[in-house]
Amino acid sequence: MNSQMRKGAIELCVLSLIQKEDWYGYDIIKKISECFPVTGDTIYPILRRLTKNQYLSTYTAPSPQGPKRKYYKITPTGRTHYEELKTEWLNLTHQVFEIIKED
């Protein structure tokens, strides 16, 4: 898959997970990896960018084992961004399907 397309799809997946509940970075990687391979080298830059753009906020919480964990929480601006990305993705995939179904 084209890297730009993959990056956009992964960002949408990250936001989809976090808009339902707060997530710890490593758990995001594990969950998305159930569908397609991703690593921290892919996910953490997306999380940093989404946080920098104020789509996500962070907080730390105690961990059952080891040090405190950093959790990601969606902001109101992030919810709007997620809905816009989701609409764009659904429209795009529908339009692409309409073209390629003829094959």
Image: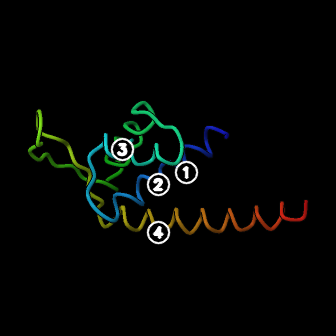
Task: Give the Cα distance between marks 4 and 2.
Answer: 12 Å
Furthest-top residue in view? 41
Given the image, on which type of amino acid does mark 1 rest? Ala
Q: Where residue 94 sits in the image (x, y, percent)? A: 71, 68
Q: Which residue is mark 4?
A: 83
Tell me the mark number nearer the camera, choosing from 4 and 2: 2
Q: Are marks 3 and 2 in contact (CB under 8 Å)?
A: no
Check disc 3: other Cα within 10 Å, few if <14, some if 14-19, many if 20+.
many
Q: Where residue 101 sits in the image (x, y, percent)? A: 84, 64
Q: Secondary structure at mark 1?
A: helix
Q: Are marks 1 and 2 in contact (CB under 8 Å)?
A: yes
Q: Which residue is mark 1?
A: 9
Q: Where residue 57 sits in the image (x, y, percent)? A: 24, 53
Q: Secondary structure at mark 3?
A: helix
Residue at horizontal 47 percent and vertical 46 percent from the top: 34
Check disc 1: other Cα within 10 Å, few if <14, some if 14-19, many if 20+.
some
Residue 47 is tagged as: 3
Would residue 71 appear left or right of 25 to someone viewing this image? left
Q: Nearer the viewer, residue 74 or 32?
A: 32
> Which image quadrant: the N terminus?
top right
Would residue 102 appear left or right of 83 to someone viewing this image? right
Check disc 4: other Cα within 10 Å, few if <14, some if 14-19, many if 20+.
some
